[in-house]
Image (cartoon, helix red, strand yellow):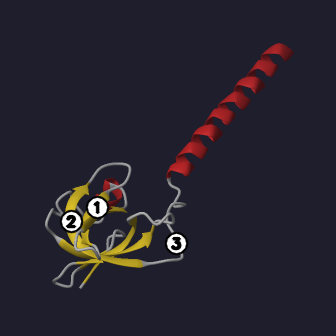
Amino acid sequence: MKNKLMQAVVRGLAIVGLIAAGTSLAVAHHSAAAFDSTQRKEVTGTVKKFDYSNPHTWVWLDVANEQGGVDTWGVEGMSPNFLNRRGWTRTTLKPGDKLTIIIRPMKNGEKGGMWISAKRPDGEVLLMNGEIKE
């Protein structure tokens, strides 16, 4: 009887350990550590591509640089599932759309960040939390 009880306890601890390990991986995925949450940066450019895929959407924006060329910026957004429930679709942003985006910039200085809001030339404001303000 003691042997069966001990086996049940060991199995239970093993299951709890596996769940805890899996949870830490899931939490690590949602880290915003790469972005400087104390800063906001405004970037104006043209949508090159809108990746509407899991786990996060990405907007690739061509932005004019000081040398007269163009740099491509990557801006991370919310998941398609989250955005679908707030009225977004895979065609909300299309190549060629002009946007001014406010982001949390990358801590390492790379050209990219995390989406806060964007404004179209007609004044429409796009927030990934579902609000659209004029």
Q: Is residue 117 left or right of residue 6?
A: left
Give how far across and how far down residue 65 sits, in percent: 28, 73
Q: CA distance from mark 1 to mark 2?
A: 7 Å
Vertical placement of 29 versus 65: above or below? Answer: above
Give how far across and how far down residue 71 sits, in percent: 28, 65
Quadrant where the image shows the C terminus: bottom left
**What residue is drawn where x is 17% and y is 82%?**
121
Kind of residue sitting beneath label 3? Ser
Camera sees residue 128: yes
Q: Which quarter of the figure has residue 62?
A: bottom left
Q: CA distance from mark 3 to mark 1?
A: 19 Å
Question: Residue 113's mark?
Answer: none
Kind of residue sitting beneath label 1? Val
Q: Is residue 34 left or right of residue 81?
A: right
User: Which of pointers 1 and 2 lies earlier in the amino acid sequence?
Assistant: 2
The secondary element bearing badge 1 is classed as strand
Give how far across and how far down residue 61 sits, in percent: 26, 65
**What residue is drawn where x is 40% and y is 77%?**
41
Q: Which residue is mark 2?
A: 47
**What residue is drawn where x is 27% and y is 61%?**
60
The secondary element bearing badge 2 is classed as strand
Question: Residue 59's mark?
Answer: 1
User: Which of pointers 3 and 1 lies earlier in the amino acid sequence?
Assistant: 3
Q: Which residue is mark 3?
A: 37
Q: Which quarter of the figure has residue 87?
A: bottom left
Q: CA distance from mark 3 to mark 2?
A: 24 Å
Kind of residue sitting beneath label 2? Val
The secondary element bearing badge 3 is classed as loop
**What residue is drawn where x is 59% and y is 44%?**
23
